[in-house]
Structures are given as structure tokens and as C-alpha cells.
Amino acid sequence: MKEAQRTLGSKFTWICDAIDNPIKHAMGNAPNSEFVIDGEGKLLRKRSWSDAAALRADLEELVGTVENPTDPADLKLDKQLPPKAAARGVLKRITLPAGLRAVVIEPKMETGADAQPFYAKLRAEADSELLSSGKGQLYIRFMMDPLYHVHWNNLVEPIRVQFVAASGGKKPGLDGRVKPGEWRGPEVKEPADIDPREFLATVDLGESREPLTLVVKYFACNDDEGWCRPVTQTYTVHLRSDRDGGRASGRPGGNRGGRRPGAGSRGDLAGRPGFGGRPGFGGRPGFGGRPGFGGRPGFGGRPGFGGRRGFGGRPGFGGRPGFGGRPQGGPPPQSGPSTTIFGRVDKLDVEGGRLLIETRGGGRQAVRISETTRIERNRKSAQLSDLQNGDRIVVKHSPVESGPVTATTILTRGK
């Protein structure tokens, strides 16, 4: 953040979330959400997707109108492309398998005068088999961070990546669970470039569930500042889905980005049920391409939550057709009141057989249960008393126009 402030030369106040995104998670986890908070810290407005026109209307209501508001076009700013550190497009990208999901990576932060920035950023993605069974493919990619205006130095030894095994010795050997245990980058004719360095590894954890340790060595150069230096950095790769990892890499021949990471029906090696991102709540403006999701009454007003394919790109919820949408190739959705609620458990009234849900749009919905209501928590049969505040929840119910609904099926996920 300090480097961005220095580079941009801005004078306004910056607020930065911590590296593990506690504010993002606490505020709903949407990638482009918008909040209006007053000077006392009171939350006045919230949206899951930023809407400039709605925000201006909010500010006029809360603060007052402006006689001569400034439009961005009035500033007549010259568009300036970021400086190009080196050549691009000199390497052919590899073909990726389908169904990759971002996994959690933990950089080893150095301290002291010799500590260097992570000029090359690691991106690690695993296929579903690796996450569920411990045997599958792992995609590794390093990209130069454009903030630092650095490039690869192709006149020296190329990038080298090693998966090392923990041992009592001073020189740990390669991790036998990963093939290849050591990878060298390509020889490039251009003296300098900023193309990604990427490869696929095959991982077989066997009975082990220990994370992987990755050591990368490369040369980073900055022509503007006149330096070129060797860099060695270490990461821990945890084979569990990264809730903040965004969309998986998608290119022709590989994962096409149709599924959101973490939204599959399987869990991961950390024992979490793989609930992942919430469908339609991030990655797209509003719901179905319209901004302002969460600000409209009726929560969409369509059965099956818009009638699209299930939860995470599969028919139904977790691969079961008929829950949350139609199976692929099925009949088109019919109009009518919504019969599905997505959100989190807000309050429980076990004795009264009721619960209150905080919906994804920021509202509240009361739900009743009956003797026939089917309840599952983390894919196991459960009672209402087993649910916990904060659990992610999906409720299927009969059509109703307003007020409390009676659930036919409740599915929850939580710690």
C-alpha cells in the first residue's frame, strides 16, 4: 500500500484491510460491495455491488445536494497507460485442466534490512481430485507485480522452483509427493520480459496431509532504477480452497471460468465442506447482470433463484437436480414467487421452531420449521438446535408472497 501511495502520489486517506481480509469477510465477502458509514461509525447504506447513481442519491439524501456537481468527464484527464517494464507475449501459455480452484498460499515474510518485496507473486490452483482425495494436479504460476516495474532477467539462470521436504538437516531434500519436485523456467530469447512463468505438477499426498513448501529463486530487474538482484522466497501451499482466491484461471483448452472457486459439492483436505463462495453474490453486477442486487424487494421474484443451474454450476445443490434451479438442458424457468433463500443464520428460536436469516441482500427473513422439515448441517442429518449463528444456509420453501415461510428443506454449512 505504501508503494501504491508513493507511485500514485495521492493525498487522500488510505484504509487497508489486513492480509487475511477480516473486514471483507465481516462485511459480507462480496468483491465490489459498497457501504456508507457516518462519522460515528454507524452503517447507513450497504450494497453487494457498487452503484454510482444510487450512491449519489444516498449522499444527496444524507448530506444534501451540490449546486454544481463535478462529472468525471468535466475533469478532461489525459489517459496514461502504465509504463511497460519489458516485452510481453513472448512465451506460449500452457493448457490448463478444467475445474481448477485457487488454494491458500502463505508467503514467508522476511524481516530486517535484507528483506525484499515479493516482486513475483505466486498463484496456486488445484483440481478437484487433489482437493478431495489428495491426488491430482497443481497449477503454479508466478507473475511479476506491475507495481514495482520489474521484469525477468533472461540473461542469467531462469526462475527455479523447488518443493522441499521438511527434515532435521540444514539442506532439506525435494518433496517426494510432488512431481516434478524441481522445475526450471524456459530459456527465453528476449533479454527481458514480463510473461508469467507457469507449470503443472502432479501431487500424491498419500497418507500425509501436511502442506507443501515451495522455494522460488529468480532475478528481478528494474531498468528505471538501474538494479538487478537475485531473489529467494518461500511459500507454504495449503491444499484447501481460498475463499478470497477469485475466479480460477480460464483459457481455451482449460478451465473456462464457469464455476466459481470453492462452489463445488466436494470438501477439501482441511475437512471443510466446500461451501465456498455464494452463488450470484460477487463476480457479477447484481444478479443476472443487473446492478443493485440486494436493493430490490422480492429477492429476484423467480423460482429456483433465477432458474439457473444449481449451486456452483451443477444441477441442484451439491449435484442433486431440482434444488436451486433446473438440471442442464431442462425446461426454462417459470415466473412466480421465490422459493429459495440464501444467507446466514442470524438468530435461533429452538423452542418456538423458528429462525431468522440474514439474506444475501442484507435483509432479514423469518423461517418456521415443521415436523416434516428436512434439516442437514455439513451434509449430516441435524436438528434445529444443531445450527449455529453465522452458519451459511439455504432454505427451500413453498411459494409465499410475504412474511414468515415454512421450510421444507434446510441445508447449512459451518465450523
Image: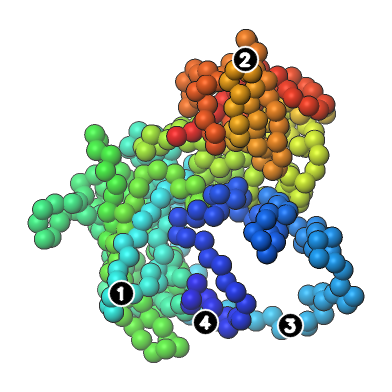
The residue at 67%/56% (across/down) is: 42
Give the amino acid at mark 2: Thr
Q: Disc 1 vs disc 3: Cβ atoms closer than 8 Å?
A: no
User: Mark 4 or mark 2, which has the lower sequence index?
Assistant: 4
The residue at 68%/64% (across/down) is: 39
Position of 38 with respect to 138 (left or right) is right
Mark 2–mark 1 Cα distance, whole angstroms, equals 57 Å
Which residue does the numbered mark 3 point to in the structure image? 77
Is there any visible trace of residue 26 in the rendered image? yes
In the rendered image, the quadrant that contains the C terminus is top left
Which residue does the numbered mark 4 point to in the structure image? 6
Which residue does the numbered mark 1 point to in the structure image? 115
Mark 3–mark 2 Cα distance, whole angstroms, equals 59 Å
User: Mark 1 or mark 4, which has the lower sequence index?
Assistant: 4
Instruction: Residue 336: give x, y in percent of width and height.
Output: 82, 27
* Helix, strand or loop status at disc 4: helix
Q: Residues within 10 Å of mark 4 (few under 14, many from 20)?
A: few
Which residue does the numbered mark 2 point to in the structure image? 373
Q: Nearer the viewer, mark 3 or mark 2?
A: 2
Q: Nearer the viewer, mark 3 or mark 4?
A: 4
